[in-house]
Image (cartoon, grey):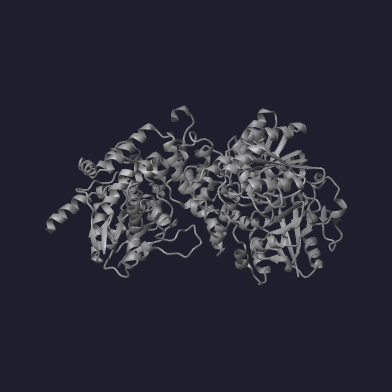
């Protein structure tokens, strides 16, 4: 199985450990992982700011990098969703369509495609699961609290395979963290208040770590945790699933 | 061109291609029930602030009302089986405003909804539209067999009946506008008593 | 085209002011979350909930695809019922019609139940300028009216006010005891005050929740009974309705009335769902059908679904941005997510900020009882607003630079090497007070090497 690793730009630049964990985990699980080295960004920062019309260059570059693989796997629900919903090309719409079908967020890939049942991982800590909105409501990697439908969660299904990990409950299971791309600076006041409230929910329930399938949310929450000099840390779910002691 | 024609022309130009109406039968059959609806009705209506009494006959209603409302207050009844009160047909032509001091109004309903505690009353039963709103307290009498599970069945029952005015009333007048704390007795009746006859 | 022509504050500025008082933000947020929680409990009691939403959405699809014939059918049936129907192309015409109806009858005082349409049209101010006094009879609306403010929420107009503040307002205007803040006593004070109003007003204006084409009747939902008290006691009942309030048949109420209040407050239904068909003997009912931009929105393929809205307010209660910024920060009659997709249709420049007042988290679309794709429309409005030129020039320049850099692997890598390119660009500038990120958040720590660099070395070592 030829898998291309799609590493979002901010993960590449700020959180290489999450990308390394993703790569190692996929290799452990028997995938032939390729990292197309000319990848940059999915274009979402521009698109969500209203500049989707400027993302043509990013789209074409993405197509150049990611065509011809069985699957494209990304440790970010948000970037995955952007590709799934918005990758188009005037020159190569056929290739774009293929990619939109083959791109997966990491936890959905592990559960739905690799059908992982066990993991050799241990993480003996209390962990709070932050449901990132785009993974949740866009990719449907877990059930949304608003809907009258049976509960499920691909990320927590995987976390339950990790030895020693204790998942803490939250008062608000899927409230947004307030990152929202450029929202975090344009609407600074509301954004940081949202982040603060999310962090406090995890802390109140005794979490030692906050994890998520999306690093953009974790980057936001980490910024708040560190400003408040909290001992609570953020960690991408790939790092937990790849963690052994 | 009048505004009417201007608006209709603009709408006609901008409305999109045809979309069929969905089938309501599935929802109606999903919610249909042959169970005893008094229990669920009572639970929901009570939670909404109504007082629900399952009674054997009109005599029992009278006894309860006599206990709850002291003699001498202005009571208007729309139910012939409950005599001794001002009969609503007799005051049909009075000015609506003249009912401002009515303490209790008793009216019949022929349709109640178990899922939400609502009772359907038309102008025929109210006689004077403002009565069930202006009275300090409201009592409604209904037969057990007139309860339906949900609004789906309620509108099947109403069908294409003609009325000047009709209302679903599901409890006492209430508000939660001040800090979301529920207060019974906003502008309409301060209580709703529902009497369920066999 | 520039945003400098407007002197009013935009959503980020108003939200920042709201956030100066954090305990109050917490209180506002908790109060609305509680309403969302009540909605969840009510929805989960119905196993058929999602089918109900889908059905409602499809009925509205049918309405929007046949609106002109339904409007004509409604009008014809309403006329048959003895109702007088008026048409208003815009807010001004609506207000003139109301004014004329009142002045022709020598009426200078009117009681009004909740109607977001009249807020949209600024009817009260219009009538006040012409010597007509309007008293809002919904408790929440009366409170904000006395406070000289617009409602901050379409269902819970004074959700932003604390009971002590309401106590002060009532003490000043209605003579309640100083310091009294018990909601029961304050509500009783309003009851006595408004009863006198109901009994003395010859004209009552109400909104319309649903208008049924098949029968010509209108349905009005309240918990307080204020619409009925006003309408039944007045000589003339004026009902103002946005033209999208039409539903085809009476039986469709069996879908909408099951959804509306469960979505709004978690109640299974409002206390009163009143069906007005014919006027009482000797009295009049007038219905004003209002367009005010709706026919334009109908023509916007990406946004026409916003006209499905039944004004339950669920999207506001669930929206974290609304909960933490308050309704007034949206500076429009209908706040929150739904307001943010409706308002740009009326004035794209004035409301250019609103589609950006969202993280696109999508919770609004999930609670919407008629399944409006609210967050997708927010995204689409952003594209429209940018293309129309209603965004700051600096942002456009930054975005163009970003797009250019990200489209080139060489530039991206070079920029990354020059001290992590992203540090210098949106959204993380330098570590100082001028950087909005840094105000409440630390910057991410820059790692020694990027993943790309690590991967290249790893490959090198493997060789």
Instruction: Give left or right: position of C41 versus B43.
Output: left
The image quadrant that residue C153 belongs to is top right
Q: Residue at x 63, y 60 (%)?
A: B47
Residue C348, image x and y in percent?
49, 36
Q: Nearer the viewer, residue C134 or C341?
A: C341
Instruction: Give left or right: position of B92 versus B121.
Output: right
Q: Is residue A8 visible?
A: no
Residue C10, image x and y in percent?
46, 35
Q: Is residue A161 above or below residue C347?
A: below
Viewport quadrant of the N terminus of chain B: top right
Residue A179, image x and y in percent?
38, 47
The image quadrant that residue B20 belongs to is bottom right
Residue C427, image x and y in percent?
33, 41
Instruction: Give left or right: position of C213 versus C339.
Output: right
Viewport quadrant of the C terminus of chain B: bottom right
Q: Is residue C238 visible?
A: yes
Q: Residue at x 42, y 64 (%)?
A: A152
Q: Nearer the viewer, residue A48 or C40?
A: A48
Q: Nearer the viewer, residue A16 or C248?
A: C248
Q: Residue at x 26, y 52 (%)?
A: A65
Q: How many marks?
A: 0
Instruction: Give left or right: position of C204 versus A105.
Output: right
The image quadrant that residue A168 belongs to is bottom left
Q: Nearer the viewer, residue A27 or B98?
A: A27
């Amino acid at each position: 199985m030829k898998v291309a690793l799609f590493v979002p730009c901010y993960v590449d630049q700020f959180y290489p450990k999450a990308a390394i964990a993703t790569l190692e985990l996929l290799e452990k699980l028997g995938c032939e992982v390729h990292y197309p080295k000319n990848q940059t960004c999915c274009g979402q920062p521009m698109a969500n700011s209203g500049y989707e019309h400027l993302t043509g260059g990013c789209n074409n570059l993405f197509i150049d990098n990611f065509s011809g693989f069985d699957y494209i796997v990304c440790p970010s629900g948000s970037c995955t969703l952007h590709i799934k919903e918005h990758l188009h090309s005037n020159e190569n719409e056929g290739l774009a369509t293929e990619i939109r079908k083959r791109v997966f967020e990491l936890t959905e890939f592990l559960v739905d495609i690799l059908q992982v049942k066990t993991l050799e991982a241990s993480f003996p800590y209390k962990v709070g699961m932050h449901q990132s909105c785009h993974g949740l409501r866009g990719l449907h990697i877990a059930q949304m609290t608003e809907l009258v439908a049976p509960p499920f969660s691909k990320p927590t299904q995987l976390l339950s395979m990790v030895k020693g990990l204790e998942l803490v409950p939250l008062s608000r299971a899927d409230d947004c963290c307030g990152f929202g791309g450029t929202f975090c600076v344009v609407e600074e006041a509301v954004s940081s208040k949202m982040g603060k409230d999310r962090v406090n929910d995890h802390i109140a329930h005794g979490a030692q770590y906050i994890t998520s399938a999306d690093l953009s949310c974790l980057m936001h929450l980490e910024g708040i945790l560190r400003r408040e000099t909290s001992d609570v840390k953020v960690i991408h779910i790939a790092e937990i699933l790849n963690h052994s002691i | 061109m009048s505004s009417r024609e201007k608006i209709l022309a603009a709408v006609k130009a901008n409305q999109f291609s045809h979309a069929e109406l969905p089938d309501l039968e599935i929802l109606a059959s999903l919610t249909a029930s042959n169970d005893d609806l008094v229990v669920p009705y009572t639970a929901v209506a009570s939670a909404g602030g109504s007082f629900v009494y399952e009674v054997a006959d009109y005599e029992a209603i009278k006894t309860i009302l006599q206990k709850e409302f002291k003699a001498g207050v202005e009571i208007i009844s729309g139910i012939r089986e409950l005599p001794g009160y001002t009969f609503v047909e007799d005051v049909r032509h009075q000015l609506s405003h003249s009912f401002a001091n009515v303490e209790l109004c008793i009216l019949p309903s022929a349709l109640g909804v178990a899922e939400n505690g609502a009772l359907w009353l038309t102008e025929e039963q109210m006689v004077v539209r403002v009565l069930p709103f202006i009275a300090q307290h409201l009592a409604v009498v209904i037969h057990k067999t007139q309860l339906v599970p949900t609004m789906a069945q309620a509108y099947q029952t109403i069908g294409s009946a003609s009325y000047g005015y009709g209302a679903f009333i599901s409890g006492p007048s209430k508000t939660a506008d001040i800090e979301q704390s529920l207060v019974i007795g906003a502008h309409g009746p301060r209580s709703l008593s529902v009497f369920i006859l066999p | 085209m520039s945003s400098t022509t407007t002197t009013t504050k935009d959503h980020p500025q108003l939200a920042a002011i709201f956030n100066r008082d954090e305990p109050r933000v917490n209180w506002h947020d908790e109060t609305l979350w509680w309403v969302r929680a009540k909605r969840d409990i009510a929805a989960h009691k119905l196993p058929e909930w999602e089918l109900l939403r889908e059905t409602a959405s499809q009925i509205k699809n049918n309405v929007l695809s046949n609106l002109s014939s339904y409007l004509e059918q409604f009008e014809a049936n309403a006329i048959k019922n003895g109702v007088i129907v008026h048409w208003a192309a815009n807010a001004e015409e609506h207000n003139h019609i109301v004014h004329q109806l009142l002045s022709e009858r020598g009426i200078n005082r009117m009681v009004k139940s909740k109607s977001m349409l009249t807020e949209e049209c600024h009817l009260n101010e219009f009538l006040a300028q012409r010597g007509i006094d309007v008293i809002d009879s919904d408790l929440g609306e009366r409170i904000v009216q006395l406070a000289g403010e617009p409602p901050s929420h379409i269902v819970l107009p004074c959700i932003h006010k604390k009971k002590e503040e309401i106590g002060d307002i009532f003490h000043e205007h209605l003579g309640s005891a100083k310091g009294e803040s018990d909601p029961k006593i304050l509500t009783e004070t309003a009851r006595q005050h408004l009863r006198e109003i109901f009994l003395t007003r010859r004209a009552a204006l109400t909104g319309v929740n649903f208008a049924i084409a098949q029968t010509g009747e209108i349905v009005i939902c309240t918990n307080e009974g204020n619409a009925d008290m006003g309408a039944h006691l007045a000589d003339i009942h004026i009902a103002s309705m946005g033209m999208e309030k039409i539903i085809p048949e009476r039986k469709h109420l069996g879908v909408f009335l099951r959804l509306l209040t469960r979505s709004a407050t978690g109640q299974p239904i409002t206390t009163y769902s009143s069906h007005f068909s014919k006027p009482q003997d000797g009295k009049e009912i007038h219905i004003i059908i209002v367009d005010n931009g709706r026919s334009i929105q109908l023509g916007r393929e990406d946004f026409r679904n916003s006209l499905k809205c039944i004004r339950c307010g669920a999207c506001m209660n669930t929206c974290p941005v609304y909960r933490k910024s308050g309704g007034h920060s949206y500076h429009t009659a209908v706040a929150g997510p739904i307001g943010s997709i409706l308002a740009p249709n009326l004035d794209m420049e004035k409301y250019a900020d609103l589609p950006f007042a969202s993280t696109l988290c999508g919770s609004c679309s999930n609670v919407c009882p008629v399944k409006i794709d609210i967050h997708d429309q927010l995204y689409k409005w952003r594209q429209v607003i940018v293309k129309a030129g209603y965004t700051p020039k600096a942002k456009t320049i930054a975005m163009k630079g970003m797009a250019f850099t990200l489209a080139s692997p060489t530039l991206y890598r070079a920029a990354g090497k020059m001290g992590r390119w992203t540090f210098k660009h949106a959204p993380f500038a330098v570590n100082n007070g001028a950087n909005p990120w840094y105000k409440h958040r630390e910057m991410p720590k820059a790692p020694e090497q990027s993943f790309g660099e690590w991967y290249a070395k790893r490959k090198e070592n493997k060789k």
